[in-house]
Image (tube, rainbow, N blue to C red):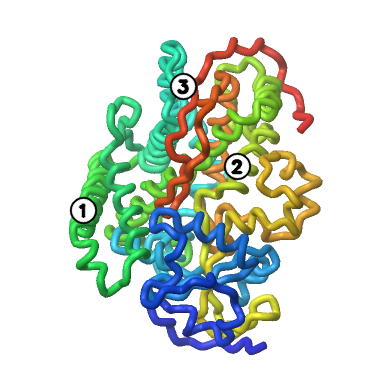
Amino acid sequence: MAETTAPTVLPRGFRGAQEGWPELHRIPRPPYRVPLAGDVIGSSKDTPVQDSMRLARRLGPIFRRNAFGKEFVLVAGADLAADLADEARFAKHVGLGVANLRQLAGDGLFTAYNHEPNWQLAHDVLAPGFSREAMAGYHTMMLAVAERLTGHWDRAAGAGRAVDVPGDMTKLTLETIARTGFGHDFGSFERSRPHPFVTAMIGTLDYAQRLNAVPAPLAPLLLRRAGRRNAADIGRLHRIVDEVVRIRRADGGGEGDLLDRMLDTAHPDSGERLSPENVRRQVITFLIAGHETTSGALSFALHFLSLNPGVADRARAEVDRVWGGSAAPGYEQVAKLRYVRRVLDESLRLWPTAPAYAREARADTVLAGEHPMRRGAWTMVLTPMLHRDPAVWGPDPERFDPDRFDAPAVRSRPPHTYKPFGTGARACIGRQFALHEATLVLGLLLRRYELRPDPGYRLRVTERLTLMPEGLRLRPERRPAPAPAPAGPSAD
């Protein structure tokens, strides 16, 4: 296989699979392709991920789709995804949906191209903000925000009302990242409607997805009104973030959080600092990525807990045993909730809220020894189907089973088979933050409530670049407070 390197920068913009896959004809595609429109039969502009999941079940571990002349290769098999995880041969590709967000987030951590220097600068400056010491400092603020959630749920439980799970998890996670990262309070739980940041964010994510569903030359015409709304949403997000930064500068600094690092910390080697424009882009990136995916993960986990009372009882018993009667768990106690963490991991296996990641070839290569790729050729790993590969997860991969993540089971699986946070050097920088927050919140809710599902609800998944259960409502019922007991080692 050829492993040549070249110093030139790859062209920006969309590169169709026709340009990078010399033997594209060998890769299966849907049987009914419409001229100009592509593989639109049986698909929906609102559910591209779920449409691709259905195609993967029919076409196999690697397949291709065409939308208005844009040819994509998608990977759903574990062997192929493992090969793509080789950092020596593959790198992150800023795929079409992500690139559509660059007008909002520019060269922020999530949307930067590999050749843009601000990614490495921001990563090196901000990585200490997710150290163990920093995480322990965030814990108290996470608890304070969670108390606002439980106060809201207590009132619903007292009135016998159901709660809007995705809506409340979005409020929770937005307030958590805003307070821990930027010392800002959006007042989400005191509002009768979503904060304007959330409304504008959803608008920009929806617009980015809609851009994928129309021919690029026609987008300005077909999406003229939506484009104007998107420009207004971006302007609103910029104004909100600029105000957060203005307040911080006026206050003369905070307590060493992410915003302080962005404003005041120089790169340890070069001495370079983030520019004001890049600070804005990073704040937007963290506010969106820091709450959108975690709120979805919590919502899916609560859905599965409500449908599996045996799992919920086992998780609840662990919380009662490990936390005892302590009013508020300490930072170290959260890591001891091993079974609760398995519930979260299994929820992210079935419905990873960031449902795909893209990889591009650093040089000419052959994927898994079978599919030639030219330098710059890219493919998208369909994470929900990677997480359902029967060769890894057994004959019943659709079944919810947290014991798939007990220690022996994890050790028995090949690497690179579980990727809810992406892969490689540019995997999610905040994954430990998200996992600690989500485990803490699940523990608090399990200890405090029984979760009653709506018997008529059937899971519907909405897509806006991330995944979220749609219309999920649960009825919380208060439990008696656990009796004080010494915290012992977890048997799970």
- Residue at 43% x, 25% y is 163
Q: Is residue 485 visible?
A: yes
Q: In whole angstroms, how far apart are the C-alphas of marks 3 and 2?
A: 22 Å
Percent position of residue 108, x then y: 38, 60
Q: Is residue 365 above or below residue 414?
A: below
- Residue at 48% x, 42% y is 460
Residue of label 2: 347
Percent position of residue 205, x then y: 35, 53
Q: Who is closer to the viewer here, 213 or 91?
A: 213
Give the SS element for disc 2.
helix
Q: Is residue 320 left or right of residue 237?
A: right
Give the SS element for disc 3.
helix
Percent position of residue 342, x then y: 67, 39
Which label is found at residue 123?
A: none
Q: Are the residues flagged by discs 3 and 2 in contact, CB closer than 8 Å?
A: no
- Residue at 40% x, 51% y is 464
Residue of label 3: 150
Q: In whole angstroms, how far apart are the C-alphas of marks 3 and 1?
A: 35 Å
Mark 1 or 2, nearer chain start: 1
Tag 3: residue type?
Thr
For the C terminus, the quadrant is top right
Name the mark nearer the viewer: 3 or 2: 2
Residue of label 1: 229
